[in-house]
Structures are given as C-alpha cells and as structure tokens.
Amino acid sequence: MAEKKILVAYASRYGSTGEIAEEIAEVLRDVGVDVSVSNVLETENLTGYGGVVIGSPIYMGKWLPEAVDFVKNFQDDLRRVPVAVFAVGFSMKEATEENRESGRAAISVIRPYVHPFDVGIFAGKLTYDDLSGADAEIIKMAGVMEGDFRDWDEIAAWAGDLEPLFKDIS
Ligand SMILES: Cc1cc2nc3c(=O)[nH]c(=O)nc-3n(C[C@H](O)[C@H](O)[C@H](O)COP(=O)(O)O)c2cc1C
C-alpha cells in the first residue's frame, strides 16, 4: 500500500499553536507517517494528502477566522479523508468539564463542514510582552495570568492515538 501523506494545518497569532502542530507532526513521524506542517494561510490545496489535522487557538471564544475559512474552503476534500481537529486556549489550563466544553463550543462553527474523528482541547501559552496593544488590553481587563500551560505529554498522547491517520501504512 502506498504511504499515506498527512497534513497538519494550523492557525496561530503568536506561535504557540504552531509549536503544538510541530509536536503532533513529530509524533506522527515517529510512527512512520510522512507529515507536512503548514499555516492554513499558506496551504493552497490538499492534493495528495490522505488525512488532515487542523488546529487553531481560541480567541474570544472562537477559532481564528482563517482556520474556519480553511475548513469551509476545503470542505469537499476534507469529507474524503480522516480529519482530526484541535483547539488551544488558556481556559484549558484547568481541565474542568466546563472549560473543555468551552473549547468544544469554539469549534462548533465548523461542524456543518467537517466531521472530525477526534477533537483535542489543549491549554496554550500567553506571554504579556508578545501581545499586540489590543490583545494586551483585553487580557489585562480579563485579569488573565500569563504562562506556558501547554502539556506536551497530553499533546503527544493525543497525536499517538490518531490511528485513522496511520492505520493504512504498510
Ligand atoms: C486577546 C486574547 C483572547 C483570548 N481568548 C481566549 C478565549 O476566549 N478562550 C481561551 O481558552 N483562550 C483564549 N486566549 C488564549 C489563547 O488562545 C492562547 O494564548 C493560545 O495559546 C494562543 O495561541 P497562538 O500563540 O498560537 O496565537 C486568548 C488570548 C488573547 C491574547
């Protein structure tokens, strides 16, 4: 059987979701998958990919618009291959059911277009000094604590369980 090629496509404003996408790709490479990683804004087509992972941070309760647009634009291709999605946000630093639900709610907008076999909800990273003026204002008003809350073991475990993406590899 021909080797499957997988795309990990991500949106990111300050880079932390891109690093999560790279970690997911590393785990998939370790099980023998041929993986590309690219920002959704730089992904022109899905030709040749036998599976796709799509991730975005959550801003004000929502996936970034370019991630939603990616799903809408490629919905026909995405219906033909296994798709897993993930969302990243500060609320997930406390993995309560309520916070996980807010993560799932952030991706409800893509449900009409794609049917992911798995949804990952991960804690992200916030660094005050990196933020644009407008984002810094919002975060200050909300009184959100900065920090890197990404749980690399949890992310790697999730990626390692994405079996529909690598089960056909000979
Ligand atoms: C202005 C702003 C709004 C945010 N809104 C949310 C939110 O509604 N829910 C959440 O869980 N995280 C929220 N976050 C946290 C980001 O999702 C988190 O920092 C993420 O890791 C950023 O990813 P990036 O570095 O790839 O852009 C917000 C962050 C900023 C700066």
Image: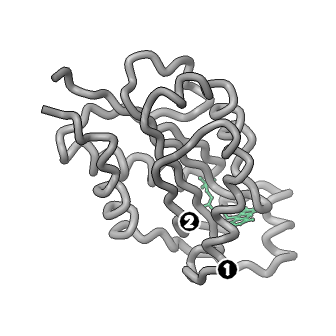
On the picture, is 77 further left or further right than 8?
right
Q: Are marks 2 and 1 in contact (CB under 8 Å)?
A: no
Closer to the camera, 111 or 126?
Answer: 111
Q: As drawn, is 165 to the left or to the right of 111?
A: left
Crowding near the residue tagged with mark 2, few <14, some 14–19, many ≥20 C-alpha atoms within 10 Å:
many
Q: Quick one: SS at disc 1?
A: helix
Which residue sits at x=70%, y=51%?
A: 63
Ligand 1 within 8 A of label 2's CB? yes
The answer to whether 162 appears left or right of 123 in the picture is left
Residue 83 image position (x, y, % from top left) = 47, 40
The correct choice, above or below, for 64 with respect to 168 in the image is below
Callout 1, which amino acid? Answer: Glu
Residue 93: quadrant of the picture? bottom right
Q: Quadrant of residue 143?
A: bottom right
**Label 2: element kind:** loop
Crowding at label 1, few (<14), some or many (≥20) Cα neighbours within 10 Å?
A: few
What number is the disc on residue 12? none
The vertical placement of 17 against 4, above or below, is: below
**Earlier sequence position, callout 2 versus callout 1:** 1
Separation of disc 2 and disc 1 at Cα?
Answer: 17 Å
Q: Residue at x 28, y 56 (%)?
A: 160
Image spot of residue 129 (x, y percent): 67, 64
Q: Quadrant of ligand 1?
A: bottom right
Viewer-proximal residue, 76 or 48? 76
To which residue does mark 1 refer?
Answer: 98
Q: Is residue 149 above or below residue 72?
A: below
Of the 4 image quadrants, the one containing the N terminus is top left
At a point 65% along the width and 76% down the height, the residue shown is 99
Q: Which residue lies under the disc numbered 2?
A: 124
Residue type at tag 2: Gly
Q: State how the image is colored.
A: one colour
Q: How many marks?
A: 2
